[in-house]
Image: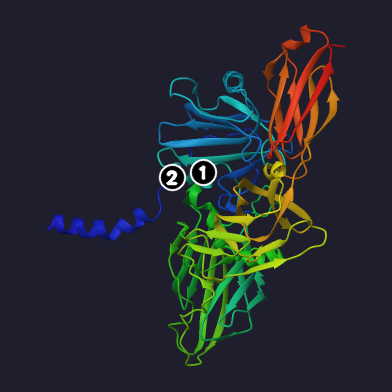
Amino acid sequence: MKKCCFLVLYFFFLPIYTYSQVYPKNFFRSPVDIKVAIAGTFGELRKNHFHSGIDIKTKQKINIPIYAIQDGYVSRIKVSSFGFGKTLYINHEQGFTSVYAHLENFADIIENRVQEEHYKKENFEINFHLPKNEIKIEKGELIGFSGNTGSSTAPHLHFEIRDTKTQKIINPMLFGFPILDITHPVINSILIYHKNGTKEVLKTEKIKSGTYQIFEDIQIKDFFNIGINTVDFLDAAPNKCGVYSIELYVNDTIFFRNKMESFSFNETKYINSHIDYEYYINKGEKFQKCFLEKNNKLSTNQTVKYDYIGTSLKEGKHNIKIIVKDSYLNSTILTFQVNLTKENQEIKKEKPKDYINSQQVFEFKNDEIEIYIPNNSLYKDYPFGYQKDIDSLLTYPIYKIFDDSIPSHKPFIISIKIDSLKSDLRRKAIIVRLENDKMNYIKSKWQEDKIIGQSNNFGKFTILIDSIKPIITIKEISNDFILVKIKDELSGIKKYRGEIDGKWVLMEYDFKTDILKYKRGNDRKIENQILNLSVTDKVGNTQNLDIHFNND
């Protein structure tokens, strides 16, 4: 009898423990000794990705000391011109990995290992793993200094905690770091998706902190869906941040739930289905959808409803409630009513013939162009859109594929046939995507009688011939460093190499400013030195410059 009761209690309480993992509190120390102020939260909505950690402010300064949050060992070091910039990974015995990104420099023992790898690979871009016993780290040990490297737009520390085994990112704010937050999230507005395809924005009215309402009844025919514009604020900084969870209830029954507890890097691009991408591109506002498109596989969606609200509801008034929480469970509630009327008309499941089945491969071909879109690239079915235009200012036609407000989850392939291009220009031919007044190079190459490119975005494409060499400009020469600006207007910089006396030297590249920086070292003992610099773009145009300097 006791055994039976135990099993009943076990299965009764099981959902509580499997619903969300319990993370250790007060186990990790802060990665900084200054007051922790947050500029960006985990899961925050960014361009083409969810934010994978928290951004800790460093008083708008570089070189703020950064410390290890727990005992461990350096497992990986990555240095890149883009993304996380200079990044350090530390594995901890408890199954967690901590990540410290956008660093200006590493602590000496780590910096020496990094320099060794730079010169071994003869490359600024490095990414390597270290054995467990090579560089051991103690809790609170200095490991580096904050910076603004990579794609960072201002000095700060990007900080992550990952599951070491799976490399899934976990919300660092669940581990009890000293972050002050008693502020409730803000709900600015909602977006109603009507049956006829129109979208209606409705502003909310704040009753008090944590309570919002829409007073007028919303008129709905047959079925609908909802998106929400919401942000969070923490107490130590004025930055708009992302929220932790969104729950949508219809007559007190859960319809949709999303919770930013953990996710994998390979699913972060689902943000373009999670938000209303079309509305964002056209209007500049981000609404999070409280429903799922059929190819949205984001694991943070915990209640899966692919149908519309209203398909199983009777006519009349219905109560809608949306609950938004931050990582410290400060809650905000929005309530309103919808007045539903039925037209006795079933949802049309058949789509016109020009609609693409988003779960299948799609191919289009004519005498000039071929388009290949992999399966599951589109988040839902769309009518295929293709158009060819002529612009008197361009040598080649403009090919419009869909609209730039339609997101693509996977890269797709464009092949454009060119019969008239001279053989010596073929390797200089590139495909560019036209965006406002910009021409953005997409990865492309010449093959037989056509140029083949790969793009992550739909829109307008054309062909250009890139025969212009990169530009090199000396900005500053001092006793400590040499600054050089490198720029390429069309295909972009592919590689660069600096040499002194025929030997490779380390030059750090900041793509945000187009600056190459060479830090002078032991070479000061030699007079009248020459730095030989070569810069090559993505179609092979190369520019060379000899930079003379001495020790005065």
Going 64% across and 83% down the picture, which residue do you hit?
216
Q: Which residue is mark 2?
A: 23
Looking at the rendered structure, the kind of residue marked 2 is Tyr
Image mark for residue 68: none
Can you tell which of label 2 and label 1 is closer to the viewer?
A: 2
Callout 2 touching callout 1 (CB < 8 Å): yes
Q: Which residue is mark 1?
A: 176
- Residue 102, by quadrant, is top right
Residue situated in front as seen by the camera: 243 or 376: 376
Q: Position of residue 259 (x, y in %)?
A: 49, 58
Q: Position of residue 134 (x, y in %)?
A: 47, 19
Against 255, residue 548 (above or below) is above
Looking at the rendered structure, the kind of residue marked 1 is Gly
Check the picture and name the quadrant holding the N terminus.
bottom left
Query: Mark 2: which secondary structure?
Result: loop
Dot placed on the residue nearer the N-terminal end, 2 or 1: 2
Residue situated in front as seen by the camera: 421 or 189: 421
Against 153, residue 211 (above or below) is below
- Residue 101, by quadrant, is top right
Check the picture and name the quadrant holding the C terminus.
top right
